[in-house]
Image: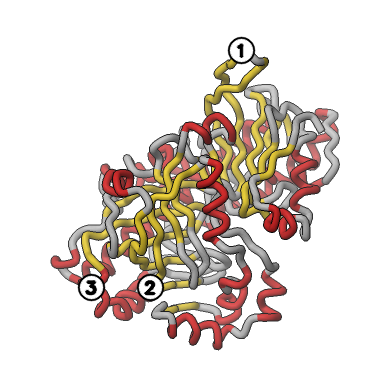
Amino acid sequence: MRVPARIYATGKMLDDIGRDRSLEQLINVTTLPGIQKNALVMPDAHEGYGFPIGGVAVTHYPDGVISPGGIGYDINCGVRLLKSNLYYEDARNYLSQLADELYKTIPSGVGRGGKLKLNSRELDEVLAGGVGWAVKKGYGEKEDMEHIESSGSLPEARPETVFKHAKNRGRDQLGTLGAGNHFLEIDRVDEIFDEDCAKAFGLYLNQIVILIHTGSRGLGHQVATDYIRIMNKAMPKYKISVPDRELVCVPFKSPEGQDYFSAMAAAANFAWTNRQLITWGIRKSWKKVLGNPGGELSILYDVAHNIAKIEEHTIMKHETCNTKQKLIVHRKGATRAFPEQPVIIPGSMGTASYVLVGTHTAMQETFGSTCHGAGRAMSRHAAKRSVDAGKLKRELEKKGIYVQAGSIRGLAEEAPQAYKDIDEVVNVVHNVGIALKVAKLRPLVVIKG
């Protein structure tokens, strides 16, 4: 171990985390060349590819390594929360109609393409410009960009570093939800914990909001696949040895490291644009069902879960000396939680989601990071074996949650019982002060891929 490992969890959670390879993977991460301060996992931790999901690992800039396993296959999987001006009482009679319209408008499911098919020049413009491209084309307002992490675009993106097969996989997937744990939810604000912060965020009790959870689709997955293959071949050249082959990495400033970082940034831009196109589809559906009385949908915030970024953080060198330095921050299933920034933590269909706010404590302890969701407690295979999807759908509807799902098997995989208790996860990060509770959301409509 080059640095300590740090775990945010209760004793009970630690028992659960110990049932898979998360802790072993966390210890492996501490051996990365150039790693700084400590390797972290959040209370939603579970086993991932090489790195645990719910993990944060920071390496020296520019002499540390970059690792695709520290970002994940679904590059810039993330969440966006849209706010309406309607109370639940105003919208309740339209919810099933809205669900049907959204399901019709937003393509979902494995490999599903959308109505927009880009030519090579247009796709390169998306990869280079992100949400700025979508706004220029009329798929959003300039104001939207002010409420998205990094304004929806990483400047390091170079479209030429994304290989042809990855581009072909993403060419018709903008504006699509995908499958797995991706979803759309119509929620109502169920509880307010911090009145002042909620007011500043424009949130109030019984307000209708919409949550979008998806990422870079096939394009991002292929970028990760392509560069893991390249890095596996390149590692011996740099004499890097890792305890697990899934921890594959190269020096950040090597040609392979620079190309991967640029391709990852391009995939991140694609993901933000995807959520922007979905927002455009939701706004159209909202207007069609509710008309002018429905008002406008504005973005509270959009945050990435799976990303690497160059950020400045202060690291204590010794008791009397703190230094601010540039670092390569890997967040894999972790949310940026800078002070005063909205932090959106999605739940799992039948359970709550949360809005929190980032803190200075997070800057000191976790490189400005917190948890990203409930975190899986059960594998997808185990969930499929143990959950009756039809019964689950009926149970959710009895609770007043209207469900639209492309795949009944997918619904079983993402059953609430396959996830940890979101309330316990959020309470951990709130109690240690790395993100503070602002509002709790209750699902009314769930659309699954």
Q: Up-down: is 67 above or below 101?
A: above
Query: As shown in the figure, which amino acid type bears the numbered disc 1?
Result: Cys
Q: Residue 444 carries which label?
A: 2
Say which amino acid is labelled 3: Glu
Which is more N-terminal, label 2 or label 3? 3
**Type of amino acid at the residue the image marks with label 2:** Leu
Q: Position of residue 440 (x, y in %)?
A: 40, 59
User: Measured from the top left, where is residue 250 in percent x and y?
Assistant: 73, 33
Alpha carbon of mark 1 to alpha carbon of mark 2: how far? 51 Å
User: In the rendering, at what x and y percent does residue 403 appear?
Assistant: 44, 78
Residue 167 seen: no
Q: Nearer the viewer, mark 1 or mark 2?
A: 1
Left or right of 253: which side holds 193? left
| Cβ atoms at labels 3 and 2 below 8 Å apart | no
Percent of width and height locating residue 257:
67, 33
Spatial CA distance of label 3 from label 2 is 12 Å
**Is disc 1 placed on a helix, strand or loop?**
strand
SS of the residue under disc 3: helix
Front in this rendered view, residue 165 or 4:
4
The label on residue 89 is: 3
Q: Which residue is drawn at 38% across and 45% down?
A: 131
From the viewer's side, name the closer residue of 261 and 414.
Answer: 414
Neighbour tally class for label 1: few under 14, some 14-19, many 20 plus, Cα within 10 Å:
few
